[in-house]
Image (cartoon, rainbow, N blue to C red):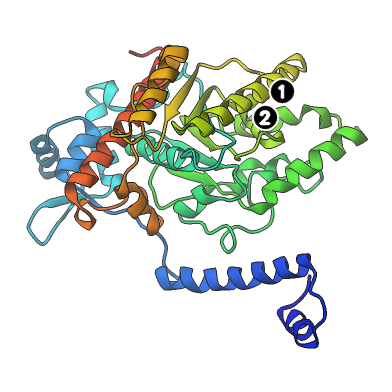
């Protein structure tokens, strides 16, 4: 790898700089400047924290009235809260979950997680075209489920690792070698137990297996392992993600996988690990044509995997319309077209394109983390309502898979 000084010296001498040296140089200076920018935004010793919730927000999360939340907080010694400058009670998510446990003593429906006979839900969120809202969908879904009281594991299988960055782990600086899921599914003697690559996040109830560029190694290793046949399970690459997650069966209710935007070995292994599949769709003709290619290729590859013993028994598969603009006539026509073709497999709710979601993303937040006071309130409320509607529909599918209405 050429150093910056070496490239500068070559330039001064008029020596031709090769493309690999140029790219290496650009990557190096960009990485260093990103670190500077990151430290300006976030103190080197600071960690992301989740904001507190008003009693009204806590009541919405719990499905009770605002006055009942305040009543429990004032009557039960196990519930702590803080008062704002205006004298209003605020609650951390841990405190909300304490109230949830109190409510669950008298009514089980307040505790929505798995019961003894329920299987762990593994939701693979996928599409191999960039810009379809895949990572935005995955991250908001994982946080929504944690807010609702589920034990959630987010798995970032995308080497670009945008989900990890949003959840407080910079892939370049906070994730070391062998700390992604690759560490638990690799073919050599450096493979490690999957629980060793799990990180707690600042979001109670939500853990993360982060991603970074080393995930590409699985794509390179698998063909070599298949060709060498030097491992008893080398030809079972499609079972590796599932086998790793089985070890966590007693720890989580739901796993949300942000798949890479390619149809490679990682994506196929994630699809075989999944109990449910969510395909994000941006309602533009080019994106629909791309999705058609994705579906055709996926069908061909999964049929081969199925013949080799891969598990493709899904509880549900749905298409989610993302970045939808309600006043865009052509988009509305495409949505109607998809609904006519796929019927109930297209979720009723759509992820509406919103400046509130984009604005929150500028500071590496989701709409669930951003405070209502930080942006135009009507825009914020519309974004939260649309996001809640999508995620509630997915939650209902999870509950139905567990045999609950």
**Where, by quadrant of the figure, is residue 62 drawn?**
top left
Where is residue 257 shown, x and y percent of the image? Answer: 54, 36
Q: Are marks 1 and 2 in contact (CB under 8 Å)?
A: yes
Q: Which residue is mark 1?
A: 301
Label whose residue precedes the other's in the sequence (1 or 2)? 2
Question: Residue 21 or 368: which is nearer the viewer?
Answer: 21
Is 230 above or below relative to 23? above
Seen at 72% across and 70% down, the residue is 22
**Residue at the outermost front position:** 330
Where is residue 200 shown, x and y percent of the image? Answer: 48, 50
Identify the mark at residue 205; answer none if there is no mark: none
Question: Residue 185 or 303: which is nearer the viewer?
Answer: 303
Taking the image as drawn, is residue 129 in sight? Answer: yes
Where is residue 95 shown, x and y percent of the image? Answer: 26, 45
Is 400 above or below relative to 387? above
**Where, by quadrant of the figure, is residue 103 drawn?**
top left
Seen at 29% across and 52% down, the residue is 370
Taking the image as drawn, is residue 98 in sight? Answer: no
Seen at 11% across and 35% down, the residue is 68
Callout 2 secondary element: helix
Question: Residue 330 or 274: which is nearer the viewer?
Answer: 330
Q: Which residue is mark 2?
A: 268
Mark 2 crowdedness (10 Å alpha carbons): few <14, some 14-19, many ≥20: many
Callout 1 secondary element: helix
Is 274 above or below relative to 4? above
Mark 1 crowdedness (10 Å alpha carbons): few <14, some 14-19, many ≥20: some
Quadrant where the N terminus lies?
A: bottom right
Q: CA distance from mark 1 to mark 2?
A: 8 Å
Where is residue 353 shown, x and y percent of the image? Answer: 35, 40
Quadrant where the C terminus lies?
A: top left
């Amino acid at each position: 790898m050429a150093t910056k000084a070496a490239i500068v010296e070559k330039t001064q001498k008029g020596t031709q700089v090769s493309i690999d040296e140029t790219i290496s140089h650009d990557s190096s200076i960009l990485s260093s400047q990103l670190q500077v920018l990151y430290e300006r935004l976030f103190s080197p010793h600071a960690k992301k924290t989740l904001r507190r919730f008003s009693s009204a927000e806590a009541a919405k999360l719990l499905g009770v009235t605002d006055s009942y939340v305040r009543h429990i907080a004032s009557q039960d010694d196990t519930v702590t809260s803080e008062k704002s400058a205006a004298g209003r009670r605020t609650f951390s998510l841990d405190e909300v979950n304490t109230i949830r446990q109190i409510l669950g003593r008298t009514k089980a429906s307040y505790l929505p997680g798995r019961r003894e006979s329920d299987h762990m839900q593994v939701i693979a969120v996928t599409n191999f075209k960039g810009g379809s809202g895949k990572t935005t969908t995955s991250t908001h879904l994982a946080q929504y489920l944690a807010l609702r009281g589920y034990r959630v594991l987010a798995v970032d299988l995308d080497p670009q690792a945008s989900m990890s960055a949003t959840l407080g782990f910079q892939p370049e600086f906070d994730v070391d070698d062998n700390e992604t899921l690759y560490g638990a599914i690799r073919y050599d003697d450096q493979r490690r137990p999957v629980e060793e690559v799990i990180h707690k996040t600042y979001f109670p109830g939500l853990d993360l297996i982060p991603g970074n560029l080393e995930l590409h190694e699985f794509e390179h290793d698998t063909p070599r392992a298949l060709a060498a046949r030097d491992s008893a399970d080398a030809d079972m690459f499609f079972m590796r993600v599932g086998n790793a997650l089985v070890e966590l069966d007693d720890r989580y209710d739901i796993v949300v996988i942000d798949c890479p935007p390619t149809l490679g070995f990682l994506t196929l292994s994630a699809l075989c690990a999944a109990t449910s599949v969510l395909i994000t769709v941006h309602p533009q003709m080019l994106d629909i044509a791309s999705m058609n290619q994705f579906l055709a290729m996926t069908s061909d590859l999964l049929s081969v995997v199925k013949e080799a013993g891969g598990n493709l028994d899904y509880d549900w598969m749905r298409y989610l319309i993302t970045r939808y603009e309600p006043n865009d006539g052509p988009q509305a026509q495409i949505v109607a077209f998809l609904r006519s073709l796929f019927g109930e497999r297209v979720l009723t709710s759509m992820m509406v394109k919103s400046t509130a979601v984009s604005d929150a993303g500028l500071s590496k937040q989701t709409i669930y983390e951003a405070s209502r006071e930080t942006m135009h309130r009507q825009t914020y409320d519309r974004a939260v309502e649309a996001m809640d509607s999508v995620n509630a529909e997915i939650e209902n599918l999870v509950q139905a898979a567990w045999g609950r209405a």
